[in-house]
Image: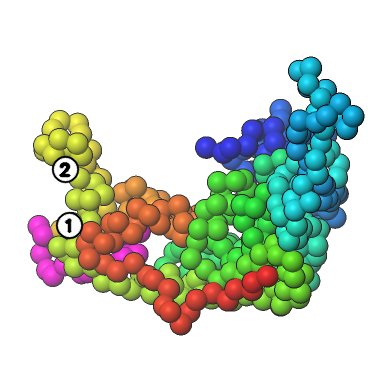
Amino acid sequence: MSRESLTWLNTNTLIGFTDKRGTAWHWRAQEQGEQSNHYRGPIPLEDVQDRLFHWQAKSRRLAVEVPAQVVDATHWESGLPMRWTVLEDKQAICRSDNDTVMGVFGTGYTRHQYREWLLSAVADLLHDDLAISSAGLLRGGAIAWVEVSMPDTITTPEGVAFRPNLLATTSFDGSIATTYKRTVTDTVCDNTRELALSEVGQEVKVKHSRHSHAQLGPARQALAMVHTLADDFAQEVARLCRVEVTPSQWEAFLDAHIPRVHTTTGLPLTGRSHTMADTKRTASLRSTGPTPGCRPGPAPPATCGSMEQVVAGEGRPGRHVDRVGSLAAHKASADRQLLRHVGCAWPRRSSGSAPPRTRG
């Protein structure tokens, strides 16, 4: 569940390409402001600037209230003289439009303004094949993102549909360094942003350090990585779908995902529960798995791809997974456990393929 209110998500996020992708889960007509936050096509860069990033982050001095003598008191509290002492080694980062305090840091903290680090950084990528698909503010403006995507869905020969994205995000509350990441999860809220960031993929990070502005140029050059995402992801899907799973592994997978025993007591299912489990297992075998033993002839092997189809489709044949954010992130933890259970290795990043990082 989102930590943001429906009103906030409907007035502080912008969602594009609704003709192709539909509305975001949080869209409510009654929560919209004077202008809808959904766009049938790409989101104009100017709208992100004017509707979301029309303010800047300002550095303000911090002070603490301490007891004082009457002669040097600045004010009285509960009948006692008090004064304010400025903390020279601290700064508060505030919004310029409403003075909301977003974070407190030392003097070495450098602000990465949203217009410069998110909008300007991706502006050179925008053309007919790449456009802004979403943008938003979270936690009162302390976090922001801009997502650049290909307008059309790509479908691999194995039937997996996805959209390559470049997610640019940063914060003023210390929760994340400025990050540029290749993703396949559509970011429309705080939860989907976290899912996208949890994907295993190429990324560039720049810390909010004193000399981080020197890293903006190299970071912009690295954003070209979005152009190779489609091919890389399609190749990974094809590789996974070619991994063979033996009949015994497939049976163990079904036992883990569609068990015939009660998950808490370990006793065999009975009645309607047993019938439903058998129906799901039979549907999975017919649509994706090896030929059941009762059929004549050798059983063709299943694949890790067919296992993923059962996980994503909940055992129902023919269910189409339109958003592969589920495959890449949302189901990742469960998939790893299931694949380990049947002895099928989950893909790991090799030591030689670590994503490039730019540090401030």
Q: Quadrant of the C terminus?
A: bottom right
Mark 2 residue type: Arg
Please state which of residues 294 and 29 is positioned toward the viewer in this rendering. 29
Rendered residue at 73%/61% (across/down): 108
Instruction: Note whether 72 is above or below 95 in the view shown.
Output: above
Residue 99 visible to the viewer: yes
Would you say 174 lies left or right of 81 here?
A: left
- Judging by the rendered image, the residue that carries numbered circle 2 is 260
- Tell me the residue at 71%/47% (across/down): 104
Choose top left, top right, bottom left or bottom right for residue 7: top right
User: How many C-alpha atoms fall within 10 Å of the one at disc 1: few (<14), some, or many (≥20)?
Assistant: some
Residue 330 x %, y %: 45, 52
Q: Which residue is disc 1 drawn over?
A: 251
- Report helix, strand or loop for mark 2: loop
x%, y% of residue 199? 50, 61
Residue at x 64%, y 60% (from the top left corner): 177
Query: How busy is the neighbourhood of tag 2: few (under 14 within 10 Å), some, or many (20 plus)?
Result: many
Q: Is residue 289 left or right of residue 224?
A: left
Judge left or right: residue 148 versus residue 263. Answer: right
Q: Position of residue 136 (x, y in %)?
A: 70, 48
Applied colour scheme: rainbow
Q: Quadrant of residue 102?
A: top right
Is the Cβ of the residue at disc 1 closer than 8 Å to that at disc 2?
Answer: no
Q: CA distance from mark 1 to mark 2?
A: 11 Å
Which span is picked out in magenta?
Answer: 293-308
First along the sequence among labels 1 and 2:
1
Residue found farthest to the right: 71
Query: Which numbered tag is attached to residue 223?
Result: none
Q: Is residue 275 visible?
A: no
The residue shown at (19%, 68%) is 246
- Tell me which amino acid carries mark 1: Glu
Image: 159 above or below 286: below
